[in-house]
Image (cartoon, grey):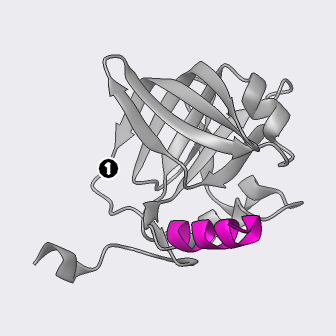
Amino acid sequence: MDKSLNTDRFLEVMGNYPTGVTVVTTTNDLKVPLGLTVNSFASVSLDPLLVLWSIDKSVSTYPVFTQTNHFAINVLANDQADICSSFAIKDIDRFSQCEWEFSNRNLPIISGAAGVLQCKTFKRIEAGDHMILIGEVIDILSTDKQPLLYHRRKMGGIPDSFYE
């Protein structure tokens, strides 16, 4: 089958798969905060507590994220679509677009997130044009806020009718 047809169909199916939205953050060697929007986030293991996400090898923050020993996964709340968009735009000061602070582990944490998992890097796996980063969860912040969802290039919260 034609490769472009496979790619188009793959993107169509993946675009129809709803996901949560996260912003993964870390700091560079100078302790400058860096972050990017990620929807390729998933749990891996309960013992030990492991999660994964993947990063495109072509993004500007790739070298920092693939060499860092710690990162934070900020699970965005349903009222944080603007933050999702800001952390997906190139060449802006992403952290000036939101409220945030350093955690006690010196990781940038986005204020108002639905949850935050601070992780130490457990494993890196090359996979095509991406690198999969597996993190061992070392600290957890959980709130009762609803998560932000992404589906067919749209963002929003879980509709109330979902729970009826």
The secondary structure that most of the magenta stretch takes on is helix
Left or right of 82: which side holds 45? Answer: left
Q: Residue at x 46, y 54 (%)?
A: 113
The local secondary structure at tag 1 comes to loop
Residue 42 position in % (x across, y down): 44, 43
Residue 52 position in % (x across, y down): 51, 35
Q: Residue at x 84, y 23 (%)?
A: 29
Vertical position of residue 149 compared to residue 132: above or below: below
- Which amino acid type corresponds to the residue marked 1 in the rendered image? Thr
Q: Residue at x 53, y 65 (%)?
A: 14
Residue neighbourhood size for the residue with mark 1, other residues' Cα within 10 Å, grouped as few (<14), some (14–19), many (≥20): few
Vertical position of residue 121 compared to residue 143: above or below: above
Does residue 32 appear in the picture of this structure?
no
Of the pair 146 and 12, the residue shown nearer to us: 12
- According to the picture, the residue beneath numbered tag 1 turns out to be 143
Residue sitting farthest toward the front: 1
Residue sitting farthest toward the bottom: 161
Q: Which residues are magenta?
A: 1-15
Image quarter of the C terminus: bottom left
Inspect the magenta stretch and tell me whether residue 52 lies in it.
Answer: no
Residue 68 position in % (x across, y down): 72, 23
Left or right of 151: which side holds 141? Answer: left
Of the pair 150 and 11, the residue shown nearer to us: 11
